[in-house]
Amino acid sequence: MLTDDVDRYIELRRSLGFKLAKTARHLAAFARYAVGRGDTHVRRETAIAWTAAVSSTPRSHQRRLGEIALFARFLHAEDRAHEVPHHHPNHRALLDTCHAKGIAAALERSRSGNGGHVWIFFSEPVPARVARQLGAALITETMEKRPEIGFTSYDRFFPNQDTMPLTENARALSARLETAVTQEEKVDARTQISRLRKRLANVTAIDFFGASSRLTAEGMIAELEASVAEDKGMADELQQSASQRAAELKGRTWVTRKGVHVDRIACSWLIRRFIDPDAIIRFAPGKGYVPKPGELRFDMFEGEFTHEGDRCSFEVLLARTGLSDPALQAIAEIVHDIDLKDGKFARDEAAGIARLIAGIAMANSDDEQRIAQGAPVFDNLYEYFRKKRG
């Protein structure tokens, strides 16, 4: 009888060191429900019906179904009449839909540790519109099969399809500017930059999930605009002394995007260690945040300190504040290689530091905790490079 099987299963698991107080209650309730339906064995249909009836959240639904699946596997080894309910973790739901359709897809665990990215690679270039239509169809079918997950589980939707060409065009235009000599060539360059800025604005209007590569595009276009600026007053302002600039940064409130990772953790460490030990750092949504008077944004779209060209926010902050310490420059190269993944500096330390920061992000969902845990990493890294130089 199923109730006796539950007692036997729980007793065996406890003999191996598992406590299983909640699991025992859940399985006992499931067994009573199944027996009440006339079942003598575990049935997938019964397991799904019971978990749907008693679960208030998708997480509790998955937990209870997982408990039944383990119990059913234990019984199935003895009697194949027991059916093991399919227990698909949420992060595999979209991947399973792709595979069912014969679409080659790969699952990558996110750096935060709170989800994953499903990658679909096309054998030839396709318009962004087509890629988005494919994504919409796959997500729709996934939600029909797994309605308990909900649309909020999908936080990005082919975000780079429109942004990447902007960065490529910006790089090409930057190369043209380096060789521009005549006034006519410079005027043409300004026209092209204005067009890129307009295209970026159009992409931003429909980028509901804040594609990270948009920061790169914004930084490159801003750098192009600065390179052709004719306002002498603006140029003089940009050339003010580093010491004066650093003094102006004290006593300010700093704002960055929620869900901090390596670039934002490193910037936060740099701010509190070398710029303003008493700095207040706040966290805001990646898009649509309107800064309050006195606030400085970093690693954010249209922020005061964010990506410029192919430089990450840490590199930009370091340059703008005039901090020329070689140890800090070494850290900047590591942060760049981790954040942009372009191997520009080929730092051997990048892989190890990336795993440390990823571990911190996985263990801490709170941004202030991530910064607090990440600070010793960069403190020790700084001491290493400082003493190595000495």
Image: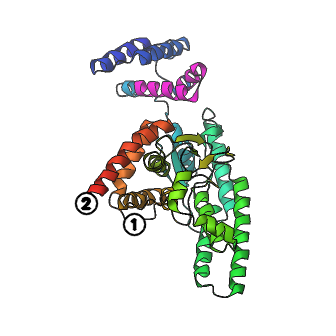
Residue 264 location in percent, x, y?
Answer: 50, 49
In this picture, is 208 found above or below 18? below
Instruction: Left or right? Give the position of 79 relative to 88.
Output: left
Q: Nearer the viewer, residue 28 or 92?
A: 92
Q: Nearer the viewer, residue 259 or 123?
A: 259
Instruction: Left or right? Give the position of 213 relative to 86.
Output: right
Which residue of the protein is positioned furthest toward the bottom in this rendering? 182
Task: Determine which residue is flagged by label 1.
Answer: 345
Q: Nearer the viewer, residue 158 or 245?
A: 245
Q: Earlier in the sequence, mark 2 or mark 1?
A: 1
Mark 2 or 1: in front is 2
Residues shaded magenta: 47-72
Regarding residue 110, the answer to whether it shows in the image is no
* In magenta stretch: residue 59: yes
- What mark, if any, has residue 363 been given in the picture? none
Circle 1: residue type: Phe
| Element carrying mark 1 | loop
Residue at 53 percent across and 14 percent down: it is 33
Q: Nearer the viewer, residue 268 or 288?
A: 268
Task: Determine which residue is flagged by label 2.
Answer: 390
Residue 27 location in percent, x, y?
Answer: 45, 17
Q: How many marks?
A: 2
Regarding residue 29, the answer to whether it shows in the image is yes
Q: Assign the magenta stretch its main secondary structure.
A: helix
Residue 152 location in percent, x, y?
Answer: 63, 38
